[in-house]
C-alpha cells in the first residue's frame, strides 16, 4: 500500500498513517515507533481525505466526507471529542492551545 500522509502522535511514540486499501477506501493506521509494528487499524476504513495533529501530538483531526472529527489521546486510547464539523479539508489544521 502506498502511504499518502504520516503524522507523529503520542509525543512521538506513535505514528499515524493515511493510505488507500485495495477497495479504494482510505485507512488510518496507528504504528508503534519503537517496535515499528502496527498497533491498530482504527477508525474503520472510510472516505478519509486528510489527517492533522495538534502540537502536543495528543490531538488528532480526521477529515472525511467534508467533515472534521477531533480525537484526544487519553490513557493510551483515542476518544472522539467533536465530530460533524463542517470545515474545508486541510492536511494541516490549526488548533487552539487547549486542543479545541
Image (spheres, grey):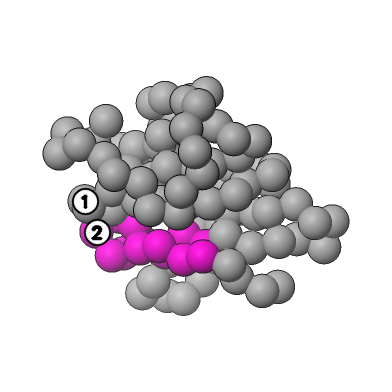
Q: Residue furthest right?
A: 23
Q: How far apart are marks 2 and 1 (CA)?
A: 6 Å
Q: In this view, does 40 lie above or below 22?
A: above
Task: Identify the residue shown where x is 40% and y is 36%.
Answer: 71
Tell me, yes or no, if residue 75 can be seen here: no
Q: Where is residue 65 in the image (x, y as percent from the top left)?
A: 65, 36
Provide the residue designation for mark 2. 11
Q: Element type at marker 1?
A: loop
Q: Can residue 10 be seen in this view?
A: yes
Q: In which quarter of the image is the N terminus?
A: bottom right
Of circles 2 and 1, the one toward us is 1
Query: Looking at the image, do the residues carrying marks 2 and 1 touch, with CB atoms under 8 Å apart?
Result: yes
The image quarter containing residue 66 is: top right
**Magenta region, mostly helix, strand or loop?**
strand
What is the secondary structure assignment of the residue under circle 2?
Answer: helix
Judging depth in this view, the residue of 22 and 4 nearest the camera is 4
In the picture provided, is 3 more to the left or to the right than 5?
right
Quarter of the image with the C terminus is: top left
Q: In this view, does 1 lie above or below 92?
A: below
Magenta stretch encompasses residue 64? no
**Would you identify the image quadrant in which residue 43 lies?**
top right
**Residue that numbered label 1 is attached to:** 56
- The magenta stretch is 5-17
Amino acid at each position: 500500500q502506498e502511504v499518502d500522509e504520516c503524522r507523529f502522535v503520542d509525543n512521538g511514540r506513535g505514528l499515524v498513517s493515511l493510505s488507500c486499501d485495495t477497495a479504494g477506501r482510505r485507512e488510518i493506521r496507528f504504528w508503534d515507533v519503537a517496535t515499528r509494528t502496527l498497533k491498530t487499524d482504527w477508525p474503520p476504513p472510510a472516505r478519509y481525505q486528510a489527517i492533522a495533529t495538534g502540537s502536543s501530538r495528543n490531538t488528532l483531526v480526521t477529515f472525511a466526507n467534508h467533515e472534521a472529527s477531533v480525537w484526544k489521546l487519553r490513557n493510551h486510547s483515542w476518544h472522539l471529542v467533536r465530530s460533524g464539523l463542517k470545515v474545508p479539508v486541510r492536511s494541516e489544521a490549526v488548533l487552539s492551545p487547549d486542543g479545541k
